[in-house]
C-alpha cells in the first residue's frame, strides 16, 4: 500500500495547526510547558512517520530502534535551538551587532548538526532496511521538521535595523 504525498501533506497540515494553536495558547497564558509541546510533537511526528513509511514487520523492528536513537539526539539539538531562540527573543528589539552575529552562527551550527545527524542515521537505516527506506525517511523527516520549524519561527520577530 502506498502512502500518498497528499495524505502526508493533510496530516502535516493538521499537525502544524495543532502546533501553531498550542504555541498561541502558550504565548497568551504561559500554561503549556515547552517539554509538553516537545513530547506532543515527537508523538505526532512518530505517528506520521510510522504511517508514511509502510514498513514490513522486519523493517519496522529495525527502523524503530534506529529512529528512537535519532529522535533522542535530535531532541538535544532542538533544546539548544529553542534556548538560543528564546535568548535572542528576550533581547528583542534591542539586538546588538554581537548578538546578531551570534544568532547567525548558532543557527548555522544547529542546522549543520541536524543535517549531519540525519545523514548518520540515514546510513544506519540504509544498512538495516534499504537505501530506498532511508531515502523515504530522510524526505519525510526533512518535510516534517521544516514544517514544524516554520510554524514555530513565524512567532519570532525579525531583527530590526
Image: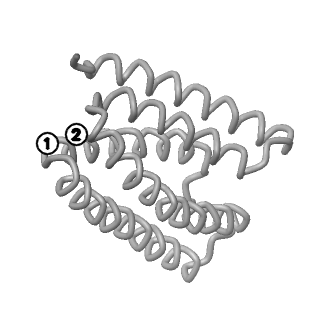
Q: Is residue 114 above or below residue 153?
A: below
* Above or below: residue 141 compared with residue 25: below
Query: From the viewer's perspective, is 33 left or right of 127?
Result: right
Q: Quadrant of residue 115?
A: bottom left
**Residue 4 x/y as whole percent:** 25, 18
Residue 161: image location, x then y, percent: 54, 64
**Taking 35 as reference, is 41 left or right?**
left
The image's colouring method is one colour
Outermost residue toward the bottom in this view: 98
SS of the residue under disc 2: helix
Marks 1 and 2, how far apart at CA = 6 Å
Q: Are marks 1 and 2 in contact (CB under 8 Å)?
A: yes
Left or right, residue 66 beside residue 98: left
Numbered disc 1: secondary structure: helix
The image position of residue 138, as x and y in percent, is 27, 47
Mark 2 crowd level (few <14, some 14–19, many ≥20, 10 Å Cα): some
Q: Is residue 123 visible?
A: yes
In this view, the residue farthest toward the front is: 58
Going 25% across and 56% down the picture, which residue do you hit? Answer: 122
Is residue 32 or residue 67 the one in the foreground? Answer: 67
Near-viewer residue (53 or 138): 53
Say which residue label 1 marks.
132
Q: Position of residue 6 (x, y in %)?
A: 30, 17
Q: Which part of the image, by quadrant, shows the N terminus? A: top left
Q: Mark 2 — residue?
A: 136
Amino acid at each position: 500500500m502506498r502512502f500518498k504525498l497528499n495524505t502526508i501533506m493533510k496530516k502535516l497540515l493538521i499537525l502544524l495547526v495543532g502546533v501553531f494553536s498550542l504555541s498561541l495558547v502558550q504565548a497568551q497564558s504561559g500554561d503549556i510547558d515547552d517539554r509538553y509541546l516537545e513530547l506532543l510533537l515527537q508523538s505526532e511526528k512518530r505517528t506520521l512517520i510510522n504511517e508514511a513509511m509502510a514498513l514490513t514487520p522486519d523493517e519496522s523492528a529495525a527502523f524503530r530502534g534506529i529512529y528512537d536513537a535519532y529522535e533522542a539526539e535530535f531532541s538535544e539539538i532542538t533544546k539548544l535551538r529553542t534556548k538560543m531562540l528564546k535568548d535572542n527573543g528576550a533581547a528583542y528589539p534591542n539586538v546588538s551587532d554581537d548578538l546578531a552575529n551570534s544568532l547567525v552562527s548558532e543557527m548555522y551550527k544547529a542546522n549543520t548538526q541536524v543535517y549531519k545527524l540525519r545523514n548518520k542515521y540515514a546510513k544506519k537505516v540504509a544498512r538495516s532496511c534499504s537505501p530506498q527506506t532511508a531515502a523515504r525517511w530522510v524526505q519525510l523527516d526533512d518535510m516534517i521538521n521544516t514544517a514544524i520549524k516554520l510554524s514555530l519561527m513565524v512567532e519570532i520577530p525579525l531583527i530590526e535595523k
